[in-house]
Image (cartoon, helix red, strand yellow):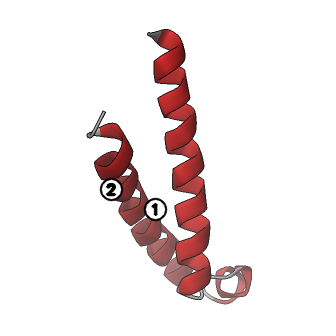
Amino acid sequence: MNSYLADIDRQAEEMFLRLVKQMAEMEGVTEQLKADNQIEWVGRMNNIRNRAMEIVNTELIYTV
């Protein structure tokens, strides 16, 4: 059981990181934006991370 849960955790983490990276690229959330306007960058990244977590939970965690 522990190895199964560890595998699900690893998959969830990989999926989350991949989604955050893809969404940030698609939405133009860059290091340049971070340098120019940190508050805007934080807000947009928080939004992206929340959406990515919801996708991971829906597609991977809640369906197991």
Answer whether residue 38 is visible to the viewer in this image: no
Residue matched to label 1: 49
The secondary structure type at the circle numbered 2 is helix
The residue under the point 54% across, 27% down is: 7
Answer whether residue 9 is visible to the viewer in this image: yes
The residue carrying pointer 2 sits among few (fewer than 14), some (14 to 19) or many (20 or more) residues within 10 Å by Cα, namely some
| Pointers 1 and 2 in contact (C-beta within 8 Å) | no
Check disc 2 and give the amino acid type.
Glu
Number of on-image labels: 2
Q: Looking at the picture, how far across and down is residue 22, in whole percent?
A: 58, 72
Q: Quadrant of the N terminus?
A: top left
Most foreground residue, 43 or 25: 25
The residue under the point 62% across, 81% down is: 25
Q: Looking at the picture, how far across and down is residue 19, in whole percent?
A: 53, 63
> Foreground mark, 1 or 2?
2
- The single residue placed furthest to the top in the displayed view is 1
Q: Quadrant of the C terminus?
A: top left
Q: Which one is earlier in the sequence, the residue at label 1 or at label 2?
A: 1
The secondary structure type at the circle numbered 1 is helix
Residue matched to label 2: 54
Left or right: 50, with 29 as reference point: left
Instruction: Determine which of the numbered discs, if any, sits on residue 58 in the image.
Output: none
Q: Looking at the picture, how far across and down is residue 23, in whole percent?
A: 52, 75
Most foreground residue, 24 or 33: 24
Check disc 1 and give the amino acid type.
Arg
44 vs 27: above or below: above
Q: Quadrant of residue 32?
A: bottom right
Left or right: 38, with 56 as reference point: right
